[in-house]
Every structure is written in structure tokens, then in C-alpha cells.
Image (tube, coloured by chain):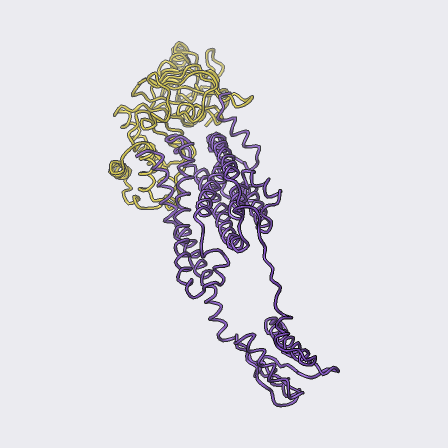
Amino acid sequence: MNKFWIILFHTYFNKLKTKSFLITTLMMVIITLALTNLNNIIEVFDKDSGKEKVGVLDETGQLYKPFKEQMSSLNKNFQLTEFAGNEKEAEKAVEEGEIAGFVLLRYDDQQLPEAEYKAMSVADSAIYTDLQSGLQQMKTMLAASKINLTPEQLNQLYEPVSFKKVALEENAKTEEELNQARGLVYVLLFVIYFAVIMYSSMIAMEVATEKSSRVMEILISSVSPIKQMFGKILGIGLLSLTQLAVLLSIGYFSIKRNMSSLEGGFFDAFGFGNISLSTIAYAVIFFILGYFLYATLAAFLGSLVSRIEDVQQMITPMTLLVVAGFMIAMFGLGKPDSPFIVITSYIPFFTPMIMFLRVGMLNIPVWEAALGISILMATIIFLAVFGARVYRGGVLMYGKSNSFKDIKKALQLTKKE
Amino acid sequence: MVLKLEHVTKRFGDFTAVKDLSIAIPEKEMFGFLGANGAGKTTTFRMILGLLDSSDGRITWNGQPINYSTSHLVGYLPEERGLYPKLKVSEQIVYLARLRGMPKSEALSELRYWLDRFKVPEYENKKVEELSKGNQQKIQFIAAVIHKPKLLILDEPFSGLDPVNVEMLKDAVLSLKEKGTTIVFSSHQMHHVEEMCEHLCIMHKGTPVVHGALKDIKRAFGKKNLVIHADFSLDSLKEYPGVVKTRSTTEGIHLQIDGEYVAEKILKDIVNKGFIRKFELEEPSLNDIFIEKVGDTYE
């Protein structure tokens, strides 16, 4: 077998077997399952605590019934009970935990309802907001009936204005499509971001480990550093695809299973309902290219340190680049067509995230995406050639080495003069 | 199968690590490199292996440059020992052997042969980090020779080993030589080179100060050692013409002399002074030559 493949599979299987990799994958699976089942999980917890009793102390003797009607149309889970007794007794009931809180209903000077809510704490804003909007509606109704408005007239008054956004550009995405794309792009950006950070530091670590354990010298006397570097990059790449495949398929089936029960809800809004094929294709392309860009960078940075402790320090600037790209992309989600986003999408270190964002959210001409991809690929090739030279010298350098001056030194080692 | 270095020079910026080194190492020979730290031994080895390019000159093996297409014929034991600490012995030896072009099954049986030979067959499935330093060194040696190289480069193979293991490793090296392997090795310890090598080269600050066959080097050095044990005082010999260096011992005196003729004269002069227990003319040791050539005390 070719030595390149030996290195590739050695890296792959060795990493696959490690406990840390298995544990990380397991944890990610659990997180994926948890996220995709978030609705169910919240429901389970809400079953106990959701139906909190709120007492109503109605001083008017008339308001309780309409208020209860309003509340039950607002939120079925809300439990209102009329509290018979005075304020002191109600307060005592709250203190003893019989009811979560109580509402004091009375008329103000104009014979319109006003209320006071008393509870142990007012931290649960959900209860508070619900009560407030219930009261507001009741007050509107009472006020309306006072000036003799019919319910029809009232409805007209409150009907929301019809307002549609229409993009005139041909093929432009509709508002609904844009919302879906935003959700999908958001999720995929996260995947790219985490994968790049995680796997590129894994590569830097791997190279530094070989160097610090000094096995490197034997390795480079048997296999050229370039083969070695790319064997490693592809080996870890294969590992990342394995991990992602596991996570994505688990995530996909988990969502599919929930889909029937959650139609039109959370998942539709996130664009999982109908993922467009081209977006997926772009996601894969940008993921792979992004990986190669940062993996190559990480491999040659890793070759410059001689102690494992220095790895993090060495790759910090690279990590910051990824973070910056991610931040810009997050900003771009709201304003994908701003000139700033357009410009940054051509900077190769940001292209994987930001060009993907543009492709996913807007309908940009194919040549723009192609140009971005070309620049990115050219950068990868340049980094690979340059990185391989640094790697070749870097792996022979030992001693205190954690500055970027060492790149020059490493290059010098590979030169004839 | 001649390994040839022709006017090889290596510069790192302004610093010259190796200067105009020319040697030829014939097939099935054992060649020794001697030199203090920083003398340029490891740099020379790295150039032979093709890890570094020489600034000037040529390195060829059988007329061909050594590169990755010949790496299955070359074995290397680096000075800085290193193996994957977390891998089992068998896993990493097989991996390293496969990278040198040896099939897996062959590598395994060869590994077992060597482990048996070093009397440590139980290490096959142990992790390297669990082994003692000396035993790691044995594994490292196996990694260098597992693929039956034709050219074996050993950088300080015996440093840090106890005498029993040194003997064991020496035996292994000699048996490889008998099987026809060309071996180049470096050492701080003169007696290893003296015992094992036909040819050698002493490096000093990048420059080869002496090189050639061991016998020729000793002959050309001219000076000899004379050991005399006698019942009378030998102090007068310290001022004797032709005596270069003296060292008194409890039993007598060690002299370094300019040549055999000095020994003859001394013997004539002292033979009537009393009882002489020992009068021995010795070839100069490599250590003497080294100190003379490199100019500072060593070992």
C-alpha cells in the first residue's frame, strides 16, 4: 500500500479508537438528541410546573367571569380560581404555597378594571405577561361596550393591517424562504465553525505530539513531510466526516420523527421542512474547503512548536480568525446584502462562512460564488505548498519555539543555503 | 554499495555546521563518527538521510542520491529517542515498518525475532510509556532495523544503557554487519568506536580533523603509550627527552612517547636500576588521538 494511505488510515483508526474521541462523539450525540427534542423535553418539565394556580380576589363581584374567559382563550394551561376571603388570607395562601400568586381586581374611578398582582416573587414574567394581556383585553371589551361598539366593530378595530414584503428582483427569495434559509444557514454556520476549530486544533495537536515525542525524525526519514502532512490532514478529515455523518444522521432522524407532531412549528421556521439541494451542496463544498484551509494552517503551525503546551498559544491567532469570520457571519444573517459582507466574503479566511451565508440567503450570481471558491482554493494551494516547506523544516527544529519568527527559521532549514 | 560524501558543506545562515567533509564508506563496513556535541555529526546524518539538503557538495549511495525512493533500504536510529508513547510496541513497530515498505505480517514475525533476541518477548503488547528507558531504547533499535536495511545509521546507539544492554546491542549491531549491512554510527564513547569500526572520522566544530582506517590513523599518529611498573622511583622519566605526557599511578607511571625508539632508550636506562614488574608498549588509544586532535579534554 502507498505510504500516504498507510499514514491516512493510521491517523484515522488511531484517533477513532481513542477514548476522548468516543466520549466527545457520545456527548455530541446526546446534545444533538437533546436539541432536536427540545420541545418534548420542555413539555415534560412543564407538565408539573406549568399549571400554576393563580387566585383571583374579585372585589367587584363582576369581573371574575369575563376575566377567566379571556384567560382561558389566551392560555389553556392557565388555572384561575376565585379566591374567597380577604387580602390577608390570600397573602397567607401564597406564603403557604397553595397558590402561586393572586390578582386583586377592582374598578377605578371611571368604572374600568384595574388590578394588582401579588406573588412571592415576580420573576416569572410569563405569568405576569399573560395576566396583563388578559386584563388588557377585558378592559378593552368593557370600554368598548361602554361606548356601544358592537363586537364586529371591535374586530375591525383590532384586525392587523395587511402588510406584505415583495422583492422585485427576479428569483429573489420571498420573506418566508429567507426565514427558512436563515435558520438553515445559522445551523450550518455553527457546524462549520465548530468543526474547523475542533479538527484543526486536533491536527496541530497531532503534529506537535509526534514532534514532542521525537518520533517525527524516524517518520520523516521514511516518508516525505508533504505526504505525511496531507496523510494526516485527510485522515483527520475522514474522522471529522465520520463524526459529522453520525451526528447529522441522528439529528435528521430525530427531527423526522418529531416532524409530524410539530408541523409548522419551530422546525419549519428553521428551514428544515424543505432544505434546498443547492444549499446543502454549497454547505458541503464550503465545509470541505474551510476544513482544508484551516487544517493546512494548523498542521504547519503545529510543526513549529516542540512542546504540546505551546500548541494552543501557537494556533490562537488562527482560532481568532475563525471566530472573527463567525462573528461577521452572525452579523450578516440580518443584513446579508451589505457591502461589508460582500467584501469579506472574498477574503479566503472568511469565505467558507460568509460566502456560504450569501449563497444560502441571497440569490447571488454563480460567478460570484465561483470566484470566492477559486480564491479560496488558490489560497489553500498556496498554504499547502508554503506549509509543506515550513513543516519540513519545522519538524526538525527543537528548543524554545513559539513565535512566528520560527516560520522564517524553518524555511531557512529547507533551503540549500 | 559505496556511500560517498564529496566536499559536503552545510551552512545555517552564517553558521557553518559541516565544512568540506569528504568520506567514502565501502559496503559492509562499519564507520564511526566521533565528535563533541555540536561537532556536526547529527547534521551530517540528516544530510545523508536527505532530511536536510547540503549547501555544497554531493552525497551519493551507489552513485544515486538518497531520497524517499530508497528509504526502504535505509535504517535510522536518531539521537533523540522517540516513539509514540500511547501506542503498543507491536502497533508502532508495524506502522514504522510499513512506512519503510515492509508488509505487516513480515514485520510482525521480524519483531518477534528481535524481541526474543533482546529477551523481552512480553513487551509486544505493552505501551511504550510503560517501558523503562533502556527497554524503550531496544524498541527504538528494533524500529531502525526491522525492515532489514542495507544502510544503517545509528546516532549514539549506546548512550544511556547499562553495560549488559550495551553488550546485547553491540552483538546485534555486529551480527547485522556480518549479514552485510553498511553501518554508520556516532558515539561519545571512544572505546565503542575503537572496538567496532574499521574506519572512522573525528569531527571538530564541523570540520573533519582526522579520518581514515583506524590502523592507519594510529600509525600516523606516531605517539605510543608506555606503561612501566617498577619498585624504584620513575619520576626522573618525566623529564626524559621524547616523553610528551606523564601520569603517575600507584604502581608506576604512564607515559606518552614520541615513538618506539624512546621506549628502547628508556628500557636500556632503567633496566639496571631495579626490578621491573611491567614494561608495556601500547598502541595509542583513540581517546589519546581525540584529545590531541580536538584539543580539549573529553570523556
From the viewer's perspective, tell me whether residue A4 is left or right of residue A110.
left
Can residue B280 be spotted in the picture?
A: no
Residue A415 in percent (x, y) is at: 49, 23
* Chain that is coloured yellow in the picture: B
Residue A266 in percent (x, y) is at: 49, 62
Q: Write the residue at 51% across / 50% down.
A: A185
From the image, which quarter does the N terminus of chain B lie in?
top left
| Residue A137 position (above or below residue A391) | below
| Residue A224 position (above or below residue B238) | below
| Residue positioned most to the right | A109
Residue A352 in percent (x, y) is at: 51, 42
Q: Colour of chain A?
A: purple
Residue A77 in percent (x, y) is at: 52, 76
Q: Write the residue at 60% across / 72% down.
A: A124
Q: How many marks?
A: 0
Q: Dividing the picture into quarters, in which one does residue B147 lie? A: top left
Q: Write the residue at 72% across / 83% down.
A: A111
Can residue B114 be spotted in the picture?
A: yes
B191, B184: nearer the viewer:
B184
